[in-house]
């Protein structure tokens, strides 16, 4: 069974997995600085057609909030999330 996922209330592709956290030097106060290098649960969200600029984004899902954002919250701005930078090619989809 597949779960419908959304961003800004618009259906989009998202999937759970894990990835290695990368540094974000453009953000001196990066919230994830103390977990850089660790593999954590994330949600990969395809933003093409649902968010300005499109692309792919990754949400921290260690507490399930990333998945809740794209499912129950339908990707609405009112439900917060923590975007995380990941090492290139480190995303591994959950089976």
Image (cartoon, grey):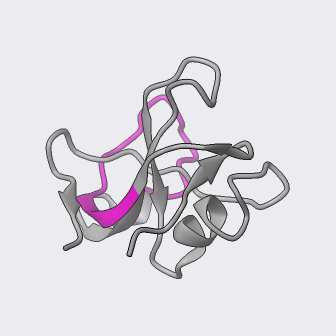
Residue 44 can be seen in this image: no
Q: Residue at x 70, y 57 (%)?
A: 74
Residue 41 x, y percent position in the rendering: 35, 71
- Where does the C terminus fall, quadrant-wise? bottom left
Residue 49, above or below 90: above
Q: Position of residue 91 (x, y in %)?
A: 21, 53
Judge whether residue 50 can be spotted in this image: yes
Q: For the point 30% across and 47% down, which residue is it?
A: 86
Report which quarter residue 11 is drawn in.
Answer: top right
Q: Compared to 52, does 24 lie above or below?
A: below
Identify the residue shown where x is 61% and y is 51%. Answer: 6
Q: Residue furthest top?
A: 53
In this picture, is 42 found above or below 95? above
Please tell me whether the stretch drawn in magenta is mainly helix, strand or loop: loop
Task: Name the residue furthest front.
Answer: 1
Query: Horizontal and vertical percent for residue 45?
Result: 46, 46
- Give the left or right position of residue 79, taking residue 18 as reference: right
Residue 27 located within the stretch drawn in magenta: yes
Tell me where the magenta segment starts and ends, as one range: 15-32
């Amino acid at each position: 069974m597949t779960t419908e996922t959304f961003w800004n209330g618009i259906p989009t592709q998202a999937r759970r997995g894990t990835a290695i956290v990368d540094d974000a030097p453009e953000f001196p106060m990066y919230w994830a600085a103390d977990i850089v290098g660790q593999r954590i649960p994330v949600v990969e969200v395809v933003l093409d057609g649902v968010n300005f600029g499109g692309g792919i984004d990754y949400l921290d899902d260690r507490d399930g909030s990333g998945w809740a954002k794209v499912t129950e919250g339908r990707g609405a701005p009112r439900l917060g999330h923590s975007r995380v930078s990941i090492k290139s090619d480190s995303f591994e989809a959950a089976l």
